Amino acid sequence: MKNRHYYIYIAAVLVIAGLMVAVALSKRSQSIEHEQSQSVEQASKTNFIMDTVVEIRATGVDAESAVDAAFAEMERVEKAFSRHLQDSVVTRINQQAGQWVAVTEEVIVLLEQALHYSEISNGAFDITVGRLIDLWGFGTGTNQVPSEMELDEALGSVGYQGLEIDADANRVRIPSGTVIDLGGIAKGYAVDRARKVLEAKGIKSGMIYAGGDITTIGAKPDGSAWRVGVQHPRESEELIAIVELKSKTIVTSGDYERYFIDDGVRYHHIIDPESGYPAQGVISVTIYGAQAVDADALSTAVFVLGMDRGKELIEGLPGYEAIIVNQDGNIWVSSGLADRITLL
Ligand code: ADP
Ligand code: MG
């Protein structure tokens, strides 16, 4: 009897001691977690969004959750602005062509930006090219050269002047038969939004790489500039230049990204809204500047305008620089980029 009490006593002491150790350990692990959440992390993640491999890197407190939030924002933008997703606002505008469609202020602002680039490029940038893009099969998976008749008919639906924006009532309308396609500007917008999410989370050093669209926050963690390569338009393993970026953006549009070859002719996805055919003359345009949404629209606009008119547009736009490569392989670099670029 006495022995039994003794054993119960020992067992109770052991249980209590065990609990005390467990409590102490859990306190310790809490404090370690706490310390970690306050310390600087480096995070880097890759996802497939907007038809491209997207990599986001960030250094800072809670960098990993900041990167996750940035990806979530990009996915939100893709869902809103893709015309291949049923619930997107772009799909709604297209399906209800001819009628006013209620949209959020975010949509109004992006469409106004698109219109601005149509105006300053004399229609070289035009989001109403949707039916032309469909005829060539970009985005559908099966490409073909359309007939002249098909192109003529579709060209009748193209024209940014037909896009009406009623900013006071938050509604937009496109003419019946017109199809809008934000492929030339939405990725830049998504990249900017993702960057803003990182910045709002306190990230002071970061980079978002989304195919041809790259934006940076500050410098690299070691303080040096981000060095971004510009791809050779014909040799996929080679670079033509390296550009140094600090809190800046670079966007490239090329005829080598999405194209098909028919009868020895290369047909790519940047369409001249005037002819209905892929734009000729230039094979790669890189735009350097602050915001990716502007650089994205400009890269497409300059591509369509060609070397001479493209140069003119860029030289008249403070804050935006360009590298233009024409079909003969000639490279033009705008004056403001000279001290940040190494040509290879
Ligand atoms: P990406 O970076 O995805 O290759 P770009 O910025 O080069 O895209 O723009 C090409 C896309 O823009 C096309 O896939 C199409 O959706 C759309 N587009 C094609 N031609 C024009 C144009 N003239 N104006 C506006 N958008 C266009
Ligand atoms: Mg573009």
Image (cartoon, rainbow, N blue to C red):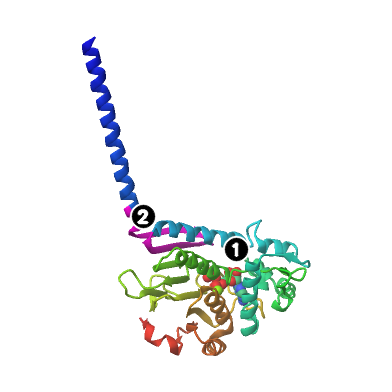
Residue sitting at 49 percent across and 75 percent down? 252
At which x and y percent is residue 48?
49, 58
- The amino acid type found where label 1 is placed reads Gly
Main SS of the magenta part reads strand
* Residue marked by disc 2: 37
- Label 1: how many residues lie within 10 Å, few (<14), some (14-19) or many (20+)? some
Residue 4 showing in the rendered view? yes
Which numbered disc, 2 or 1, marks the residue that appears first in the sequence? 2
Residues at marks 2 and 1, CA–CA distance in whole angstroms = 42 Å
Name the mark nearer the viewer: 2 or 1.
Answer: 2
At which x and y percent is residue 328?
47, 84
Rendered image: mark on residue 239: none
Name which quarter of the figure residue 173 lies in: bottom right
At which x and y percent is residue 131?
69, 69
Q: Secondary structure at mark 2?
A: helix
Q: Secondary structure at mark 1?
A: loop
At which x and y percent is residue 301?
58, 80
Asked if the stretch drawn in magenta spans residue 77, the answer is no
Residue sitting at 57 percent across and 72 percent down? 185
Q: Viewed as shown, does residue 96 lie left or right of 34?
A: right
Indicate if the residue with disc 1 has its beta carbon within 8 Å of ligand 1: yes
Quadrant location, the N terminus:
top left
Name which quarter of the figure residue 276 lies in: bottom right
Name which quarter of the figure residue 23 lies in: top left
Could you tell me if the residues under marks 2 and 1 are in contact, i.e. CB atoms within 8 Å?
A: no
Residue 228 sits above or below residue 65 on the image: below
Residue sitting at 63 percent across and 57 percent down? 85
- The amino acid type found where label 2 is placed reads Ser
Q: Which residues are magenta?
A: 35-61
Residue sitting at 60 percent across and 76 percent down? 278
Ligand 1 - quadrant of the structure image? bottom right
* Residue marked by disc 1: 139
